[in-house]
Amino acid sequence: MKKFWTKVKSFLKETFSPSPLVLSDGSISVPPKPIMPYVLIGLVVVLYFAAQVTNFSLWVLITRFFNFQYGPISYIKRFFPVDWSYMPRVIDPILETIQMSFLGSFLGAAMALPAAFLASNNLTKNKFVLTSTRAVLSIFRSLPILIYAVFFKLIFGLGALPGTIAIAVFTFGIVAKMLFEKIETIDLGAYQAIQSTGASKVRSFITAIIPEILPSYYSMSLYAFEINIRYAAILGYVGAGGIGFDLDNAMKTINNNDRIIVIVLFIFITVVLIENLSRFLRRRLG
Amino acid sequence: MSRKVASLSETNQDVIKALHSAPKSLFKKLIIGSIILAMLIWSASAISFQGINSRGLDIVINILKFFVWPDSNPLKPTLSTYLFTFAKSGVLYLMYETIMIAFIGTLLGAVISIPFAFLSSRNITGKVGSFIGSMIITLIRTVPIFVWGIIFIRVQGGAFAGVLAIAVSSVGMISKLFIEAIEDIDKGILEALDSTGATTLQKIRFGVIPQLTATFLSTTIYRFEINVKNATILGMVGAGGIGFTLIDALGSFNFGIVAVCLWVIIPVVFVIEYFSTKIRTKLTTGE
Amino acid sequence: MIKFEHVGKIYPNGTEALKDVSVEIQQGEFIAVIGLSGAGKSTLIRLINKMHDTTSGTLIVNDTLVDDSLKGKALRKFRRGIGMVFQSFNLIGRTTVIKNVLAARVAEIPWYRALLGIYSKEDKIIALDALNKLGILEKAYSRADQLSGGQMQRVALARTLAQDPKIILADEPVASLDPITATQVMKDFEKVNKEFNITVIANMHHVDMALKYARRVIGINSGEVIFDGPASLVDNDLLKRIYGRDLSDDDIMEH
C-alpha cells in the first residue's frame, strides 16, 4: 500500500516540478516548468462547471437521441417522403441568396481597401487613426452576422437589403484584417520612391502598393464570397432575405417538413459549386 | 509646361511607334469587368427599397443612444436588472452559459472529429474513403446551424440542444483541418522509428501524435472562438445562451437590453479572440 | 542651386549624423559624395528632398527654404522638381516598365486619372521618350521584375527623367550592380547631367566609380565635410583622411 502512494507521489512530483537531470559528464540540465498538467487540470475543472450549466448529460443524450417517438429521429422521419415537386419554388430564393452574397461581398471588399490603408502600421503613422480603425474592424468581426441582419432589418425592413448590408459589414471586417496584415509584410521601397516624386500618400498607395497586393486582394475577396454564401443561407431566418426563410418555414410547419431535404440539397449544390468556382479562380490567381 | 525634352511635334519616330504598339490587354480586362458589372446589376435587382422604415434614422439614433447609456428609459432600467446581477436572466450569467455551451460543444465536436478524420484521410482509407468523408463534411457544413439547433431541441430544449448543435456543426470544419494535418504527416519520421524497431503503438505515440497535437489543438481553439459567436445566435431558436434575450429585445425595440448584451458580448469575444490568436501562434511557432 | 549653411542633423536616438555642413551646389554640377557607411552621406542627400529634416542650420534648394514650414501640398510640389534613384531600384515589380515610368506623372495628373491609373497620350509619350533616352525603349511593355539589375536601374532613372527634374539624387545607385552594368548606368547619369543640365548628386561607396564620373567630390567623415573640390584633386592621402583608413577591396568596384 505504501509503495503505491510513494509511486503516486513521485509521479506527481515529476509531472509538476521535474528535478534537474544530471548528465554523465556532470553538467546539469533543468527541464522547463511544464504547463500541460496545469492546463489539463484547468480544463477538467471548466468541463465540470460547463456540464453543470448546460445540463450536459450523457444519459439524456443516449436515451433521448434514439427515442423514436419524441426524439430527433422522429422529427427527421417527417422529412420523408421528400416533396420533389417543391424544387421549382426553391430556385428564386436560392438566386436571391446568391445575389445577396455576391453584392454584399463586393461592397464589403471594396470598402476594405481604404480601411486597410488606415489600419496598416507601416502606412499610417498616426496612432489614433491606426488604433481606432483596428478597433472598429475588430468590432465588426466580433459580432455574429445574424445580429447585423436583425439590426439592419429594423432599419430597412424585410427583404434582401438588410441581408446584403449585413454581409457587406462582415466581409469588410475580415477582408480588411487580412489585407492590412498583408500590407504590413510588403516592401515599401516603391511606395517611398513614388512619394519622393511629390505624390501624396494616397496616390502613392494606389500606384505602388495596390498592384503588389491585387492578386491577394482578389483571392481574399473570393474567399469571403465562398464563406458568405453559407451565411447568406441563414440570414433568411430573421427575414433578411435568402433561402433561410423558406428553410425555417419548412422546419416549423408540420406539413412542410418534407421540403426540408429539397432545400438543404439545393443549398448544398450551390455551396459546392461556388466553393469550387472560387477555388479554381483563386488557384489561377497564383 | 516647359520641358527639357523635345516637344511633341519633334518627338522621335521610335517613340511614336512604341506608343502604338502597346499590347491589347485592355480587351481581357474589359470582358472580366463587364461580367462583374453584369453580376452586380443582377444582384442589385434583388434589393427593394420599399421596406425601408421611414423612422429608420430615428431607430439608429435610438440604438446609439441606448448603447451609450442603457438606462435612457427611466421606466425600463436595464443596468440594474440585466447587467449588475448574477441572476439567470442577467447578461453575465447568460454570457457565461453561452461560453460554456461553446466550450463543451467544441470539445465534443473535436472528440467526434478525431476518429472521423482518420477514417476520411487519403493515406488511411484511400481515395474512396476520403471522397465520402469530404462529401459528409460539406453536407454538415452547409446545413445552417439553426437547423441543427431545432433538431436537437428534441433531445432536450435549452442549453443542451445548443451544445449538440455546436458539436455537430463543428465536426465539419474541425475534421476538414484534421484531415489536412493527417494527410500531411511526414512519413520519414515513421520510417526512422521503424528502423529503430519500434512497435506500431510506439510509432503512433512518438511518430504520429507529436506531429498532430499542435494542429489539433490549434484547430480546436480556433473553432472554439468561432463557436462562441455561433452560440450567441443559437439562443434564438431556444438553444440556450444570450441569443434569445438579444434578438427578442432587438425585435421588441428594447434597446437598453440590446445595449447591455452588446456591452458584454463584444469585449468577451474580443478577449477570447486575442488569447486564441496568442495561444495558437505559440503552438505553431514554439512550445 | 543648393545651399547648405551650417547644417547639422541629430537623429532622435541621439546620433549626430552631420555637423556644421556648409556647401554650395550650382545647377548642372555632377557631385559624388564619398565616405564610410554611416559617415553621413545618405543623410546629406536625403536632407535635400526633405526625406529627413535638418536639426540646425539653413538649407535652401532652388530658392525654397527647406524647413519645418515646408509641408503638405507645398512639399509635394517642391519634390516634383527633385528625382531620386535608389540602390534597390524600388520599381513596382508586378507592373510593366512603362507603367513604372508613368508613376512619375502620378503626382501631376487629375485625381480621377490617378485613381484608375489611366494616363493621357501626352503622359505616355513623356514616359516612352524617357525610356528612349536611356536606350531601353524596346522593354517598355515588359514586366519590370523580369529585367536585369542594370535595366531596372535605367527604368528608375527614366522615371526620374519623366518628372522633368532640376536635381537628381542618387543613393548608392550602382552598389547592387556588377562592374560592367555599373559603368553603363554611370554613363547614363553622365549623359543626363551633360545633355539636360540636371544637377546630379550621387552617394557612392565605390571610390573609383565616383572619381571617374563625378567632376566634384564631397568627402565626409563622421558627419563633417573633410573635402569639397574637383575630383582631379583627390589622391590617396586624401582618401585615407576621408575614410580614416586605407581603402579596402570593398571600396573599389573594378579590380
Image (cartoon, rainbow, N blue to C red):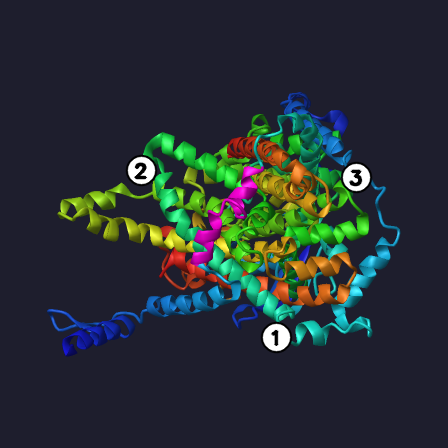
Give me the chain letter of mark 1. Answer: B
Residue tagged 2:
B124
A18 horizontally vs B249: left or right: left
The picture places residue B1, in percent across and down from the top left corner, at 79, 39
Q: Residues within 10 Å of mark 3 (few under 14, many from 20)?
A: few
Q: Amino acid at mark 1?
A: Phe
A229, C43: nearer the viewer = A229
Q: Residues within 10 Å of mark 2 (few under 14, many from 20)?
A: some
Residue A77 in magenta? yes
Q: CA distance from mark 3 to mark 2?
A: 73 Å
Residue lying at the far right of the rendered structure: B54
Instruction: Tell me whether marks 1 and 3 sit on the same chain.
Output: yes
Helix, strand or loop at mark 3: loop
Question: Can residue A136 be seen?
Answer: yes
B205, B161: nearer the viewer = B161
Q: Amino acid at mark 3?
A: Met
Reading the chain from its start, which is encountered first: label 1 or label 3?
Answer: 3
Q: Which residues are magenta?
A: A58-78
B186 horizontally vs A143: left or right: left
Residue tagged 1:
B86
C88 horizontally vs A257: left or right: left
